[in-house]
Image: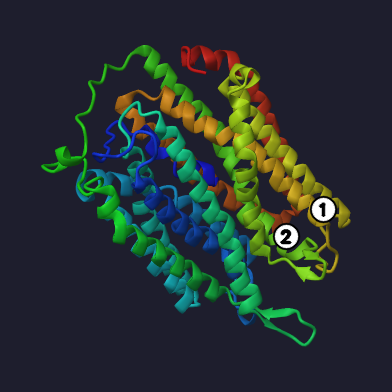
């Protein structure tokens, strides 16, 4: 899933809290503590994810687990799917029993041990245990750190949007550097080469070690400075005797009306479309990564780019393009574009991106299995560029409209529905990636491209009835 979407769910919190004495002009120092904590957590997660499919599929002697690509794609899909399911549970436990701070610590330490298990136990059992710990830990961590960002500011504070922009940069900085550093360790520093300089054994386990150390650094930073810069924010659960110490009383919530029900129905409609966007988008970590490793010419000036490094292309493009999109959405043209049009355009751009992968397949003469026949790197880069532009059309727009359409009584539930779409999408994406080996890349990529383009056009065609159900929300 996208880095932009992942940590913004806390923006809808209706119980903000701010430490006394903080400047109204600058941001609380706690924001920058959370920024660096999130940076290291995303470094840990995306570093691991960048080499996961390669670790699963490489031969034993090459440092992998020798799992068939079709089975590895399913493992990858279920893992990345459940990563977006457990936050529903972790958020609920934090609200009722733990408090956000304790949940973040539990989640961070659990993920750290998950990475260390992947490093120490290079077996199928070790892999399953490590991924299980990462899924559980992520469930505690993900929904709670973004909630803390929102609680640094009182309701209506104009600094909040800016704060999440800063926090979002931490997400993408971590996601950008992680595959580069982990790929350096797994391929360049600990990869064993033959006399011709070709890697015969990869040091994937050291990549997991680096990811675990990154998680450790994040937890040291967080727990060393949390009390100083956050005060009592997040120390106690949102219910119980201590709740009043850290949160304001909830505002009066009006009854649910027929208009509210129609608006929330729109969330389900949009979510149904979004599932297929993310199912295609998440091929970046599975089928596209496997295709890149085998069939893309990664040599630039005599330097062979590690496959995992390409997982940094998307966050790099996001950092470069997000400010431009922010300007465009506030322009007269951007304001006139309704949400279904923006999201439909995002789906169409995702499909167009896969056309460039079809160009790579065509350059190789079709689905030939000879790994000596390579396609140009530019096809892959253009695919990631179009996918990122599509993501920026769909993901932030979707998050924003969910918070606008959801009735306050169901705000968290509706955001949970949005995250569950990503859970379903990753599993669907895993099944799609599984068939690349048996059905061929050309058929799978063209099917995905055609399907999401058609869905994008359908969504745009439904703009008028959807806007009618949104009752003034655009």
Residues packed near mark 1 inside 10 Å, few (<14), some (14 to 19) or many (20 plus)? many
The picture quadrant where one finds residue 19 is: top left
- Comparing 326 with 110, the one in front is 326
Q: Which residue is mark 1?
A: 361
Q: Which residue is mark 2?
A: 292
Q: Position of residue 262 (x, y in %)?
A: 43, 17
Q: Position of residue 341 (x, y in %)?
A: 62, 23
Q: Residue at x 72, y 40 (%)?
A: 449
- Distance of label 1 from label 2 (alpha carbons): 11 Å
Residues packed near mark 2 inside 10 Å, few (<14), some (14 to 19) or many (20 plus)? many
Element class at badge 2: helix
Q: Position of residue 107 (x, y in %)?
A: 34, 58
Q: Residue at x 25, y 46 (%)?
A: 234
Q: Residue at x 41, y 33 (%)?
A: 159
The picture quadrant where one finds residue 355 is: top right
Asked if one can make out residue 318 in the rendered structure from this viewpoint, the answer is: yes
Asked if one can make out residue 434 in the rendered structure from this viewpoint, the answer is: no
Element class at badge 1: helix
Q: Residue furthest left?
A: 241
Q: Is residue 222 left or right of residue 121?
A: left
Q: Is residue 313 left or right of residue 409?
A: right
Check the image and report above or below for 55 versus 201. above
**Looking at the image, is mark 1 or mark 2 nearer the viewer?**
2
Q: Is residue 171 left or right of residue 328?
A: left
Q: Is residue 332 left or right of residue 102?
A: right
Q: Position of residue 41 (x, y in %)?
A: 44, 58
- Comparing 371 with 5, the one in front is 5
Check the image and report above or below for 94 versus 457. below
Q: Residue at x 48, y 62 (%)?
A: 44
Give the colour scheme shown: rainbow
């Amino acid at each position: 899933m996208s880095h932009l979407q992942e940590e913004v769910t806390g923006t809808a919190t209706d119980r903000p809290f701010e430490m006394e004495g903080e400047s109204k002009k600058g941001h609380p120092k706690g924001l920058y503590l959370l920024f660096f904590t999130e940076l290291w957590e995303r470094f840990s997660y995306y570093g691991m994810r960048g080499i996961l499919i390669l670790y699963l599929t490489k031969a034993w002697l090459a440092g992998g687990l020798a799992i068939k690509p079709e089975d590895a794609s399913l493992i990858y899909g279920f893992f990345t799917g459940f990563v977006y399911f457990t936050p529903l549970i972790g958020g609920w436990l934090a609200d009722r029993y733990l408090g956000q701070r304790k949940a973040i610590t539990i989640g961070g330490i659990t993920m750290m041990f998950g990475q260390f298990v992947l490093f120490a136990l290079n077996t199928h059992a070790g892999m399953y245990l490590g991924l299980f710990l990462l899924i559980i830990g992520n469930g505690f961590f993900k929904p709670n750190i973004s909630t803390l960002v929102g609680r640094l500011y009182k309701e209506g504070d104009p600094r909040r949007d800016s704060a999440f922009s800063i926090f979002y940069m931490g997400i993408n900085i971590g996601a950008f550097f992680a595959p580069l550093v982990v790929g350096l360790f797994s391929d360049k520093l600990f990869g064993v080469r033959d006399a011709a300089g070709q890697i015969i054994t990869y040091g994937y386990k050291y990549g997991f070690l680096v990811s675990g150390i990154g998680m450790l650094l994040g937890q040291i930073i967080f727990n060393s400075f949390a009390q100083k810069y956050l005060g009592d924010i997040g120390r106690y659960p949102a219910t119980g005797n201590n709740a009043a110490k850290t949160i304001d009383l909830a505002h009066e919530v009006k009854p649910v009306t027929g208009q509210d029900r129609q608006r929330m129905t729109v969330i389900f409609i949009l979510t149904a479309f979004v599932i297929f966007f993310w199912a295609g988008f998440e091929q970046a970590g599975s089928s596209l990564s496997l295709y890149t490793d085998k069939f893309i010419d990664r040599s630039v000036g005599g330097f062979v780019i590690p496959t995992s490094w390409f997982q940094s292309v998307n966050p790099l493009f996001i950092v470069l393009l997000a400010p431009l999109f922010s300007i465009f959405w506030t322009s007269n043209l951007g304001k006139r574009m309704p949400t279904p049009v923006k999201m439909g355009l995002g789906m169409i751009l995702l499909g167009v991106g896969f056309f460039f992968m079809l160009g790579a397949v065509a350059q190789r003469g079709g689905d030939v299995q000879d790994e000596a026949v390579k396609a140009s790197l530019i096809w892959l880069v253009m695919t990631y560029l179009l996918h990122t532009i599509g993501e920026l059309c769909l993901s932030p727009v979707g998050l924003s409209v969910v918070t606008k359409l959801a009735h306050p009584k169901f705000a968290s539930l509706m955001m949970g529905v949005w995250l569950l779409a990503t859970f379903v999408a990753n599993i669907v994406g895993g099944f799609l990636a599984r068939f690349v080996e048996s059905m061929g890349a050309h058929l799978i990529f063209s099917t995905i491209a055609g399907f999401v383009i058609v869905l994008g056009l359908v969504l745009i065609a439904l703009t008028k009835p959807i806007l009618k159900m949104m009752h003034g929300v655009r």
